Each structure stands twice: as C-alpha cells, then as structure tokens.
C-alpha cells in the first residue's frame, strides 16, 4: 500500500462521542457485543470508537481479523488492561499473558490439552457424564424441570477439574462444591466491567466486593496444587508420565531453566477454570435450545447417536465420538449463530497497519466475529439453523468454514477446542440416547436473551426431559440405515 492510500484510524466513521470520555457513556457492558454489531450495520465493517483516551478499530472484516489474530504475540497482544487485571487479582495465565511469558506458558498448557492426553482421560470424562445421566434420570422420573445452565456448569466444572487437576470435585452430586462457580459468577462480570471502563478505578482502590470470592478461589487452587505436589513426591514416576495437567505444569515449573514460577502454575489453574467452563456450558445450552426447536435436525442427530452407540447408554471410546459428525456440525452451527466469544480484543504492540488502516501502538483492535458468518453474501440462509451446511463438501462450504472462527485463529487459537468438542459430543449423545427433549427454553418461552459477561451467556433456561424407552434392535438398525442413506 502506498502511503497515500493508508487511512488514519481517526478518519474512520463511527458513533459520535464526547470530549475526554469518547463513547464510554454509550456502552452497556451486558449487551456491548450487540451494540458493536449494530454499529457494523450502521457504519460498515470497519469503524472507530474511543473509550476515554483509548482508540479502537472495530472490525468485522474477516481479512482484518485474520491479519490481527495471526500476528500475535509480536505485533498484537491481548489488552494490557486485561494483564493488569489478572495481575491485580493474582492470576496471570496463558489467556492474559504476553510476549515471552505467554510463549512459555502456552507450550506447557498445550501439552496438557493435546488429543493424546484427552484420550487418556476419557474414562474420567465418562464417569462425570454417567453421574449427570443418573441425576437427570431422577429429575425426569420425578417430572422435575432442570436449571439448564446450572446443570451444564456442574458438568464442565467437574470435567475441567478432573482432567486438569486430577481432582474429582463432584459438583454434580455434591451441590456445595459448585461454590467455585459462584465465585466465578462474581469475578467474570467484574473483569468485563474493568476492561471496558474509561479509567480502571479498581486498580487503584481495590474491590472489596470480590475480595472474599478471590480469597476462597485461591484457597481452592492452592489446595489442587498442594495435592498434586504431594502426589509427585509420593510417586516420582509421575514426573515422567504426568497423570494430569497440573502434574505436567509442576514438572515443567521445577526444571532448573524453566523460567516458570509458582505463580505461573496457579495462574494457569485459574485460567483453565475461567476459559474452560462457561464457554463449553453455554455452547451446549444454545445447541440444545436449537435442537429442540428443529425436530428434523433433532431426529437426524438422534439417529446418528443411536447408530454410533449401538444400544449403549453412553459413548466410552474416541471412536464412537468420532462417528458423530452430525452432532459436531450441530455444535458448530450453534456457535455460528450464538458464539460465546463474539468479540476478541487485541492491542497493538507497535505502530502497524491493518488492511489500509494505520493502527498506532497501544490502540485496540476489536474483532467482531459474528457479522461475517451471518452475511448473506457468504452464507446461504444465514439465520437458519442448518447443521448440514458444515458437512457440505463443496467449495462454498469450505470458504464459509474459513470465515467462521468460534475458537479464534492463529497462534493464540483456543488450546481447549479438542476437549470442548469431546465434552459437547459426550454430553449431547448421552442426552439423546437416554431422554426425549420435552422442553428447553427461557422462563417466558421467548428466545433467551444474550448477556455479555466476559463471554456471551444465554439468560437462564430450564429443561424438561422424559426418560426414553430403551431402543429396540429394530430401531437401532433403522437408525443405522437412516444415517447411511
Ligand atoms: C465451546 C467451548 C470453547 C470455545 C467456543 C472457546 C473459544 C475460545 C476463543 C475464541 C479463544 C480466543 C482465541 C484467540 O484469541 O484467537 C479461546 C482461548 C482460550 N481457551 Fe477456549 N474455548 C472453549 C473451550 C475451552 C476449554 C474447554 C478450555 C480449557 C480447558 C479452553 C482454554 C482456553 C485458553 C487457555 C485460551 C487462551 C489461549 C491463548 O491466549 O493462548 N477453552 N477460547
């Protein structure tokens, strides 16, 4: 690009703000993603806003987004404010870290979440799923409604803690342990509010409202670490073959040249709790909500599950899960329409250019992820819930898949995506194999509202299940035929 064709960030269109405060007073944190999407419709795919002295390029252009996400960590990083918040609350992990610290931590976290480790942990994940099945059966037999988000959060808390820390919290059966979630429910919105405030007063004044929650959460995390340390001492062979992510983190930290500290370990334990639970639980909730509204899609998913499980109540092998392509497509379709990460915020480490727009050092680039995958020029019938589009081998489908990035893109793409898909398929197939989905929805029956609190959550939903009569052999083979045809 010649220097004449470069546009300055300040020259872009955008909502009019006030002197000093910029657009700060217009922002409503709980629906900020919707506001940014509405502004795309009004000002085009690339526009600017300001929050206090911070300048933002807001972009829904997939080429801009790709260029920013791929040039991390050297040219772009996560917002410095996020790292500051993480430091204040005492948890710097791979999500908030930058530069060399991020590189060291990323390597260590990736190693623990790779497909080989997840395969080794499948029996633990199956145990958690089985407990949930028993709990849901009792509710279904009693004709009791379930609080869907609460149920799913218990599931993802149990999965993450048993996989990552080797600790079976069992929040599914022992309600009190769901305390972890209660703490996170207070801490997440605080992080979001601080991230978007023109001035981060909490950084200077502290925040007594979350202090108690942080203290208890830190105690829980310290407990996980102490247990893992004891296990490594009692069984030194674990250093060669770590049994869980926390063992692996501690072994990596203890190497003389690792450059890692105890804080790196606890920061990443907290990060796993933060990044792994709401995301997966909300994705499943939306997916079930769509399935219940689309009986043909639900039937097709059910047929695939019946065929893959061949009469079993639960999947117990990776091979069974690998045979659930349609169910996976349902998850991707739910994430296209209801992404849990509708915004990815980045900060320029140096002066740079995005597309034809000059981005000064420290300016922010707000990647707005959903408009592209709802664009009628790219996606046929964009607002329809149609999982089959993900299985279409045609070029158009491939083009569309590239534009959709529910797990982000580039070097900082979500390291938990493989685990998340395993969790989603394991739980959804358990549900479809054992229950009929009678009702999933918000209290008033309307489409659940979207609420942004760090990730995008649906409002409360309830679910009613009916126990299924066990499938007959005849139904099994009919299902298998339906899937093959
Ligand atoms: C459906 C479920 C999930 C979704 C949609 C999701 C989505 C995302 C997205 C969009 C990002 C940002 C990527 C980027 O900046 O390019 C991310 C980062 C991350 N996710 Fe996930 N995630 C999910 C589940 C999980 C799980 C289960 C874990 C771990 C237990 C996890 C751990 C992380 C971590 C540690 C990062 C930060 C990576 C880095 O900055 O290097 N996520 N995720």
Image (cartoon, rainbow, N blue to C red):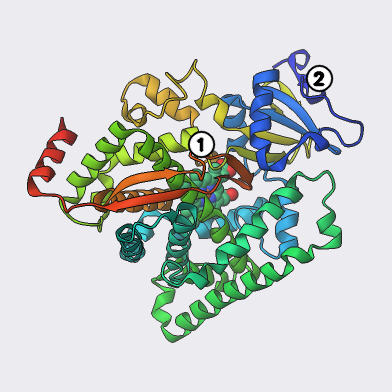
Q: Nearer the viewer, residue 251 or 83?
A: 83
Which label sits on residue 11?
A: 2
Q: Is residue 412 visible?
A: no
Task: Report which quarter residue 34 is drawn in.
Answer: top right
Task: Report which quarter residue 66 is drawn in.
Answer: top right
Residue 460: x %, y % from top left: 53, 49
User: Which residue reaches farthest right?
Assistant: 19
Left or right of 9 in this view: 317: left
User: Which residue reaches farthest bottom?
Assistant: 234
User: Which residue reaches farthest left?
Assistant: 474
Label 1 lies in ligand 1 vicinity (Cβ under 8 Å): no
Q: Quadrant of the N terminus?
A: top right
Mark 2 nearby-residue class (10 Å; few <14, some 14–19, many ≥20): few
Q: Secondary structure at mark 1?
A: loop
Q: Nearer the viewer, residue 150 or 16?
A: 150
Q: Nearer the viewer, residue 281 or 250?
A: 281
Q: Kindly indicate whether the residue at mark 2 contacts the one at mark 1 (C-beta within 8 angstroms).
A: no
Residue at x 37% of width, y 50% of height: 464
Q: Quadrant of the C terminus?
A: top left
Q: Nearer the viewer, residue 392 or 455?
A: 455
Residue 475: x %, y % from top left: 12, 43
Which label sits on residue 265?
A: none
Task: Report which quarter residue 219 is drawn in.
Answer: bottom right
Which label sits on residue 446?
A: 1
Residue at x 51% of width, y 45% of height: 443
Residue at x 8% of width, y 48% of height: 473
First in residue order: circle 1 vs circle 2: 2
Left or right of 282 in this view: 51: right
Q: Is residue 472 visible?
A: yes
Residue at x 49% of width, y 33% of height: 337
């Amino acid at each position: 690009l010649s220097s004449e064709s470069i546009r300055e960030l300040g020259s872009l269109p955008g909502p009019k703000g006030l002197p000093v405060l910029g657009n700060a007073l217009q922002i409503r944190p709980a629906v900020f993603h919707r506001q940014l999407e509405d502004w795309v419709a009004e000002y085009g795919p690339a526009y600017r806003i300001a929050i206090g002295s911070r300048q933002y390029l807001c972009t829904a252009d997939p080429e801009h987004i790709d260029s920013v996400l791929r040039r991390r960590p050297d040219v772009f990083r996560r917002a410095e404010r996020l790292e500051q918040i993480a430091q204040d609350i005492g948890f710097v992990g791979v999500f908030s870290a930058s530069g060399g610290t991020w590189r060291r931590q990323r390597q260590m976290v990736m190693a623990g979440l790779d497909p080989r480790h997840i395969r080794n942990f499948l029996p633990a994940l199956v145990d958690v799923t089985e407990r949930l099945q028993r709990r849901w059966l009792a509710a279904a037999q009693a004709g009791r409604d379930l609080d869907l988000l609460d149920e799913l959060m218990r599931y993802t808390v149990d999965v993450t803690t048993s996989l990552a820390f080797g600790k079976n919290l069992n929040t599914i059966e022992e309600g009190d342990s769901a305390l972890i979630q209660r703490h996170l429910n207070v801490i997440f919105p605080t992080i979001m509010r601080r991230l978007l405030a023109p001035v981060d007063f909490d950084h200077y004044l502290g925040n007594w409202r979350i202090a108690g929650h942080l203290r208890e959460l830190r105690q829980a995390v310290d407990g996980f670490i102490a247990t893992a340390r004891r296990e490594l001492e009692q069984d030194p062979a674990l250093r060669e073959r770590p049994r869980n992510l926390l063992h692996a983190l501690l072994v990596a930290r203890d190497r003389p040249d690792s450059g890692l500290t105890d804080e790196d370990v606890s920061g990443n334990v907290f990060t796993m709790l933060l990044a792994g639970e709401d995301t997966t639980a909300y994705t499943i909730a939306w997916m079930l909500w769509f399935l219940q509204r689309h009986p043909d899609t639900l039937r097709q998913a059910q047929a695939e599950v019946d065929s893959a499980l061949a009469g079993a109540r639960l999947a117990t092998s990776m091979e069974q899960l690998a045979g659930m392509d349609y169910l996976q497509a349902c998850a991707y379709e739910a994430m296209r329409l209801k992404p849990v990460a509708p915004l990815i915020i980045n900060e320029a480490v140096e002066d740079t250019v995005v597309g034809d727009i000059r981005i000064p050092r420290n300016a922010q680039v707000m990647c707005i992820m959903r408009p592209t995958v709802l664009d009628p020029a790219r996606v046929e019938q964009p607002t329809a819930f149609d999982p089959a589009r993900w299985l279409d081998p045609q070029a158009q489908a491939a083009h569309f898949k590239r534009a959709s990035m529910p797990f982000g893109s580039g070097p900082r793409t979500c390291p938990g995506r493989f685990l998340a898909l395993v969790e989603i398929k394991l739980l959804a197939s358990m549900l479809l194999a054992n229950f009929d989905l009678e009702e999933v929805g918000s209290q008033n029956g309307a489409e659940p509202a979207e609420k942004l609190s760090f990730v995008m959550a649906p409002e409360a939903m309830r679910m009613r299940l009916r126990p299924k009569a066990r499938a007959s052999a005849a139904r099994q083979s009919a299902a298998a035929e339906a899937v093959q045809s």
